[in-house]
Image (cartoon, rainbow, N blue to C red):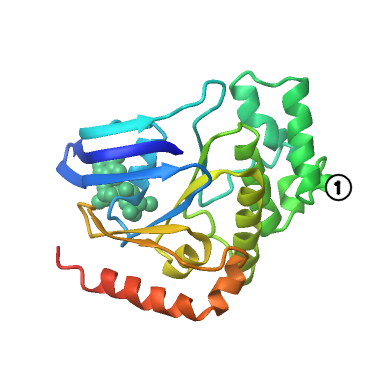
Amino acid sequence: MEVLKLENVGLTYFSQNGETQALKDITFSVHDGEFISIVGPSGCGKTTILSIIAKLIKPTVGTIIFHQKDKHTLTGYMLQKDELFEWRTIIKNVMIGLEIQKKNNKNTVKFANQLLDKYGLKEFKKQHPSQLSGGMRQRVALIRTLVLEPEVLLLDEPFSALDYQTRMAVCDDVKDILNKEKKAAILVTHDISEAISLSDRIIVLSKRPATIKKEYQLQFDSHLTPLQRREDKKFQMYFDQIWKDLQYDET
Ligand code: ADP
Ligand code: MG
């Protein structure tokens, strides 16, 4: 089922220094449980797409359609930096969005605890962020987003601040959690490998103003983890293709 759809979306920023056209004629939809990556050169308009989906900014032209089931928050945002508050314990960090939305009650506290238990953070609930590894912190940030029960997760280069080793582990982690919780996700990244290892579908953007240059429906065996995909022979094929798409960008 379709969760949301962008139709011929364009966006121009207006500022004192003039106009910047960031997006042009962007059309794509997102389905239940689907993992989509958006790749493109830096500064092309990737974050702008997520900001539009998160309703932080309105498109200049075009439409965006949300098929929202009532009680749920539609989108949840996870950023590059985990943005955990050091003075709060892990459980308190996880509860912050619920507090802001005034949904801090017995049920949501229970749900937050269940998620922390389920994903290996049971012993860390009363600790503070600095006592956790980078990978664990990122998992806390993901759980903080998941407790709000969004239908679509928006991930803006969430792994780029992590070292290589941790990044591999966190990728597997995040993919596993999203599969189990059956969430759709849109990942924005300039890292082609990351996109191939995680996604069902990849949207390749041109330079700014971003237009959709190509779309790839990836064909990997469904049981492969992100790390195992990197070992698969199709991986290199997709990599070479997308690399070329980004290199020969004359549009
Ligand atoms: P990406 O995430 O792909 O690196 P962004 O979506 O952040 O790119 O930005 C796309 C373009 O729009 C860039 O040229 C950026 O400088 C410009 N831009 C982003 N936000 C604003 C803003 N608030 N006002 C003016 N220009 C902006
Ligand atoms: Mg960005």
Query: How many numbered circles does the render carry?
Result: 1
Q: Quadrant of residue 104?
A: top right
Location of mark 1 (residue): 123
Residue 210 x, y percent position in the rendering: 24, 53
Q: Position of residue 137 (x, y in %)?
A: 67, 51
Residue found at x 52% / y 66%: 197
Residue at x-position 58% and y-position 63%: 222
Mark 1 element type: helix
Q: Is mark 1 within 8 Å of ligand 2?
A: no
176 with respect to 247 (left or right): right
Q: Residue 46 appears at what percent x and percent y?
A: 34, 51
Residue at 53% x, 28% y is 73
| Residue ranking furthest to the right | 123
Circle 1: is it few (<14), some (14-19), or many (20+) Cα within 10 Å? few
Side (left or right) of 160 relative to 84:
left
Residue at 22 percent of width and 53 percent of height: 211
Q: Depth check: 142 or 175 in front?
A: 175
Is 34 displayed left or right of 108 in the figure?
A: left
Q: Nearest the camera: 180 or 55?
A: 180
Q: Tell me the amino acid under the disc marked 1.
A: Glu
| Vertical comparison of 32 with 206: above or below | above
Question: From the image, which quarter does the C terminus lie in?
Answer: bottom left
